[in-house]
Amino acid sequence: MKYSAQVFKEMTIDWMLNRIQRILTKPIHIISFTFFVVFLFYALTSLLPILGEGVIEVKKHMNTDVFHF
């Protein structure tokens, strides 16, 4: 159980690479897929801090006493 997250991640990556090898048969497909992955990674890393700041601002204006946990 200690390494279950790592094993799951590696199995997922292996599965994705296996599917990608069947899909990406031409060099232009590899180039476009690589560009898309890099663009997606950049977009997510740029967007996450902005979303975090938005959540902090919303939490400032929320009445947290309403939630009963």
Image: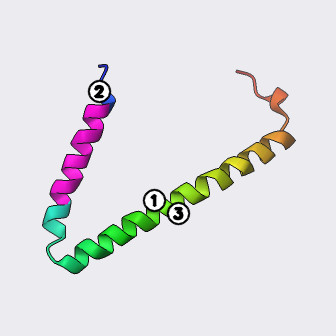
Q: Mark 1 sits on what residue?
A: 41
Q: For mark 3, what is the residue?
A: 43
Which residue is tagged 2? Answer: 4
Contact check, label 2 and label 1, Cβ < 8 Å: no
Q: Is residue 10 above or below residue 5?
A: below
User: Which secondary structure class fits the magenta region best?
Assistant: helix
Measured as percent of width and height from the top left, residue 45 is found at: 54, 55
Percent x, y for residue 39? 45, 67
Query: What type is the residue that disc 2 sits on?
Result: Ser
Residue 7, disc: none
Q: Are marks 3 and 1 in contact (CB under 8 Å)?
A: yes
Residue for point 20% across, 49% down: 15
Q: Secondary structure at mark 1?
A: helix
- The vertical placement of 56 against 67, above or below, is below
User: CA separation, marks 2 and 1?
Assistant: 25 Å
Q: Secondary structure at mark 2?
A: helix
Is residue 1 shown left or right of residue 21? Answer: right
